[in-house]
Amino acid sequence: MATRKIISINEDLCNGCGNCITGCAEGALQLVNGKAKLVKETYCDGFGDCIGTCPTGALKIVEKEAEEFDFDRTIEYVEQIRGAAGAEAMREAHKQHEAKMVVAAPRQGGCPGTQMRMMKQAQQQAKAVADGAMPVVMKSEISQWPVQLHLLQPKAPFFNGRELVILSTCSPVTSPDVQWRYIRGRSVAIACPKLDRTEGYVEKLAEIFTSNDIPRVIILRMEVPCCGGLTAMVKAALELGKPQNMVVDEVVMSLEGEITRTNRIY
């Protein structure tokens, strides 16, 4: 036993959708009596890929005393339940984890979103400040208040007739382009699927979508797995509301502020 990061499931929030089962490459989660359950501690690597698939916020990574993740036995288990293709998918997932890991050893687990790292541009920026260089001051493009999803009223006048950008909390501080590229001329909602209390988010988003004439929604999220929960909540809201004449695009940003992919999801 060791103190490490591992998945935790809030059964009160779990709706039994099963998205996390397929979202976990290690097969560590299964549905039992309509609720997601951790099959075995040694099968969970603590990376949290499953978090981004949960529309209700029932999953989170916690640090507690647990059995160590066993890569070799987990591979054997996955091959038994999902075949050779499943085992290969797990190996590929762990290659991606290892590429993102900075501090923790790959097989010790740990959410990529919590790993410390120093960006390449940080030293250059520090030197520029030391040399007395003054950056160009950019004005805010925010045209409404509030912006946090908890505080927004679904029928607020700034939603109607405008595109809506749904930002992960980290994205505006990751890239200086967010203000003019995504916020300018749009209404804004900011949320964190990992750290916010997300109860009611899906229903509020559904009401925003159906109560207003919104031609396009842009989801701007980080590449870390847990941030995929933002997209999952929007998808769940679309199932509730099914708005007409609205398109939804997902934009994924790297930790360095680069756009890595864009997907049309609705």
Image (cartoon, rainbow, N blue to C red):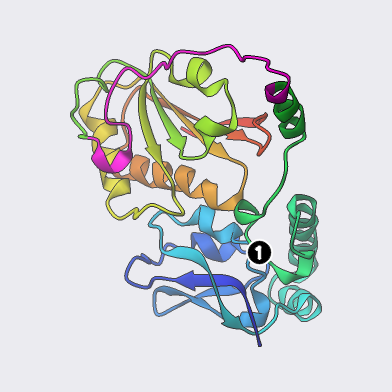
Residue 250 appearing in the image:
no
User: Is 2 covered by the magenta stretch?
Assistant: no
> Which residue is label 1 attached to?
110
Foreground pick, 135 / 3:
135
User: Is 149 covered by the magenta stretch?
Assistant: yes
Q: Is residue 113 above or below residue 247?
A: below
Assign the N terminus to one quadrant of the image. Answer: bottom right
In the drawing, does residue 40 fall left or right of residue 72?
left
Dividing the picture into quarters, in which one does residue 214 lie? Answer: top left
Q: Is residue 141 above or below residue 23?
A: above
What residue is at 53 percent from the left and 53 percent from the top?
A: 52
- Three-letter amino acid code at the position of disc 1: Gly
Residue numbers of the magenta segment: 129-152
Counting other residues with Cα less than 10 Å from the Cα at mark 1, is it few (<14), some (14-19), or many (20 or more)?
many
Foreground pick, 51 / 116:
116
In the drawing, does residue 40 fall left or right of residue 191?
right
What residue is at 28 percent from the left and 40 percent from the top?
A: 206
Residue at the bottom extreme?
1
Q: Point out residue 95 in the picture as x, y percentages from the top left corner.
A: 80, 56
User: Which secondary structure type mostly characterizes the magenta part of the structure?
Assistant: loop
What residue is at 48 percent from the left and 50 percent from the top?
A: 229
Dividing the picture into quarters, in which one does residue 48 lie? Answer: bottom right
Q: Point out residue 88 in the picture as x, y percentages from the top left corner.
A: 80, 62
